[in-house]
Every structure is written in structure tokens, then in C-alpha cells.
Amino acid sequence: MKTIVLDEIPFALDIDDLQGRLHLAYNSDSAREFRELADEAQHLARPKALFRECYIEYRGVDGVTLGTVTFRSPALRAHLDQVERVFPYVATCGREIDNLVVPAGDFLRQYWLDAIKAALLECSRSYLRTHLEVTYALGKTSSMHPGSGDAIVWPIEQQSQLFSLLGDVEGQIGVTLTGSFLMIPIKSISGILFPTETSFQSCQLCHREDCPSRKAQFDEHLWQSVLGAAGPDG
Ligand code: SF4
């Protein structure tokens, strides 16, 4: 199957919601300036995503093979035990938003712009997920991401394999990998989406305490069931 690009994602920034999350009082000067910035972002931004439909070719002890690419992750292997078809993907806020220039040293506006980019990424991720669930009649889905959760859950180095499976990710949606396997634009996400009856968040397999982005409690039982044999340090 070919990689499919979604580069005409319809979106509308929820500016009221963003303003509330940034604690900007209504009718304040800051709120007015923020809304101008968000309006510009709405016109400039082009959030995007790409994905590929894949079937699991081989299940090893601690990983799975999709096409010619093997992913080493006991957690991924466990989650895909009953799954035949999966969807590797990358979603991003897009590079076009970088044309919105905020003066160096204007840290407040840079902070606002960062929040706007995060909202754009959420738009592309949500659109992609709905697109996959509807187009392929998947029902309930979850996804896993290289580098999320404890280091041994799915090592971030496996971003290379994920990108190789998706072809020219930079040429298609402008996302590149750095030498340390982070994505540029930073507000991008990569992973494998799969149908499942059981909700899953990578945070359930993450020991990190006091993480402000935590979406689910650490689940010791789940950790032991999929990673116990690997030990705390892999
Ligand atoms: S708890 Fe924080 S660091 Fe750990 S997986 Fe969740 S968001 Fe990532």
C-alpha cells in the first residue's frame, strides 16, 4: 500500500478555548493581541498528516515486522497480538506557521505561538484519527509512539524505522528527523495506530513523576504484563 498524504485538513482554531487556557482576561490588551496572532495563524497554517495501511508480516518475541521493517518493542508486540492491520503515521502542525514571525525576545508571544502550534497539531492528529476510523471502519483505536513512556517501551531510535516505512516524509509533509530522533517541526507526532477494544495511553507505561502532560495514571499491572520480563532497565 502507498503512503497517503492528508494536506488539505480543514480546521478552525478554538480561539476562545486557547485564550482561556492561556489565562488571558476577556477584553484585555493581551487578549486582543493574542486573538490577532491566532487569526493570522488560522490563515497561514496548513496542518498535515500522512499514513500507510500495513499488515503484520511477522510476530517475534519482542517485536513485529511490517513489510520489510521490523520494530523492536515488547509493548508494541503485546498490543498487536490480536491485530492484523495497522496504520503507521506522522501528523504535524506544518511548516507554514513558521511564516508567522514573532520578534526574538518577545517571549510572551512565542509562548502563545507555541500553544497555537500545539492546537494545530491536535487538529491534524484528530482529523487523521477520524479519517482512519471512518475510512477503514476501525471502531475503537489506540496508538503507540516511539519514545513515549519508559525508554524500553518503544525506544525513540525506532523513529528511523517508522520514517523509512513512510517514505519521503520531509518531501510529503515537511517533517524531518534530527540526529537525536526528534521531529522538526517540534509540534509533530509519529506512531502506529491500531484497532483495539481496550483504551491505551503510553502514560500507563511511564514511571515519570510530576509530568504536566500526563494523560493516564501509571499502570503497574499493565507494565508487568508487557514489560516485566525486560526488567526496569531493559
Ligand atoms: S507521563 Fe509524560 S513523559 Fe510519560 S508518556 Fe505521558 S506525557 Fe510522556
Image: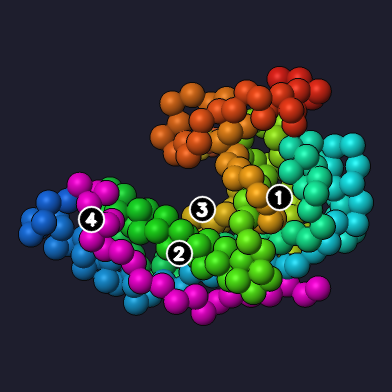
Read off the magenta span: 1-23
The quarter of the picture where residue 162 lies is bottom right
Q: Position of residue 134 (x, y in %)?
A: 60, 71
In this rendered view, identify the residue nearer to me: 96 or 28.
Answer: 28
Tell how many labels. Answer: 4
- Residue under label 4, please give it: 19
**Picture disc at residue 123:** 2
Find disc 1 in the rendering and name its residue: 159
Which element is circle 3 on? loop
Q: Residue at x 63, y 55 (%)?
A: 141
Task: Identify residue type, mark 3.
Answer: Ile
Marks 3 and 2, the one that precedes in the sequence = 2
- Please identify, in this view, whether the residue under mark 3 or under mark 4 is nearer the observer: 4
Callout 1 amino acid: Gln
- Occupied quadrant, residue 200: top right
Numbered label attached to residue 186:
3
Alpha carbons under labels 3 and 2: distance apart: 15 Å
Is residue 84 positioned above or below 5 on the image?
above
Which label was assigned to residue 70?
none
Residue 84, above or below 50 = above
Q: Inspect the image, locate mark 4, and give the three-letter code of the amino acid beneath it.
A: Gln
Badge 2: few (under 14), some or many (20 or more) residues near its Cα, within 10 Å? Answer: many
